[in-house]
Image (tube, helix red, strand yellow):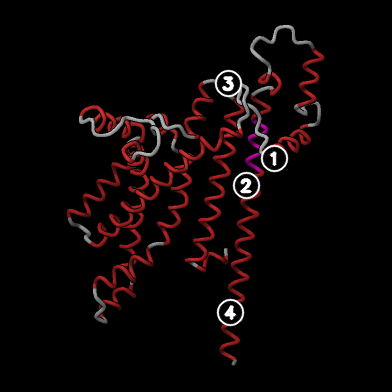
Amino acid sequence: MEPSLSRWKKLAFGTKKMRGFILRRFFTSIIVLIGATMVIFALSRLLSDPKQLLLPEDAYGITQEMLDELEAQLNLDKPVPVQYAYWLWDLMRLDLGRDLADRQLIAPRLPGKIAPTVNLALASWILATLVGIPLGVLAAVKRGSVWDYSGRIFALLGQTLPTFWVGIILILVFAVWFNWLPAGTMGEGFSIKNWVLPVVTLSWLGAAGYMRIMRSAVLEVLDSEFVKLARTKGVTNNMVIWKHAVQNAMIAPLTLSGLLLAGFITGSVSVEVVFGWPGLARYAVEAVWTNNFTVLVVVTLLFTFGFVLINFITDILYAIIDPRIRLT
């Protein structure tokens, strides 16, 4: 009974540690989000006057009484902390304001902008994972061979070539010269051809990062003492590679995966612009071109929230795989 009781105590202690870790990460994420909203709110007030943005272009004849009424509607007649509280409450109610280009509400448009960006990021993340991790394992196992050098060249090019330049070259080769794939836009309905060039362009950098990290991690494990001991005991090479080396080396790629997915979502600007992808990043670029300040604030908030959320989930998965993280 004593060993069994001790084992359950250890499990309960481990569960408490995990709960404490999740709560710490959760409150840290909340603090980061509040800090980000404060910075964005401060910049929105310092860089522009909200009531001036909402005035029509032909605002000739606007009286001071009308300006005062608009100021009261926007809560600009209140102290700055109270303005921030009202602004934050509007965000929580998804009252995101109006698009300055056509005076239409922003919130109803967001699902149609978010979905293309998230789908593109997920497809690129999956492709980068399926290519980068096996290539890293192969380069580590075949160290010093043609496979190793080829993988390292692939990683070097992927991390040095600008994404927009890669997209332009792919369009030139596969859309202009060979006419195999469309040059851009998501198209009507779903067609795999419309996704090939944007996904390959966006995923190359991620695959290169996976490859380099996985190669280094597998090489480190293969040179460790317990792997050498397993080999002396007659464990097969495949068992050493897949059971010992790859499993123990997966922590580093897992850490990268969350950052990579968040980076694909928030960093797809160049790809969406080059390929005319109707996503959130392109919406932000168009807002910059037209000085559409309200849209830019909303997109920045969405990117910040997505980045913090993905990092929070990644931290939890990391702690599940490596229990030592729960102590930090």
User: Which structural element holds mark 3?
Assistant: loop
Seen in the image, is 178 located left or right of residue 328? left
Q: Quadrant of residue 68?
A: top right
User: Mark 1 to mark 2: distance in Å?
Assistant: 20 Å
Span colored in magenta: 35-43
Quote the CA–CA distance across marks 2 and 4: 33 Å
Q: Are marks 3 and 4 in contact (CB under 8 Å)?
A: no
Q: Amino acid at mark 4?
A: Lys
Question: Badge 1, how many Cα within 10 Å: few under 14, some, many 20+?
Answer: few
Given the image, on which type of amino acid does mark 1 rest? Arg
Q: How many marks?
A: 4
Q: Between tags 2 and 3, which lies in front?
A: 3
Mark carried by residue 93: 1
Look at discs 1 and 2 and give the one toward the viewer: 1
Which residue is at the far left? Answer: 146
| Picture residue at 34% right of the left edge, 39% below the top | 191
What residue did someone put label 4 on? 10
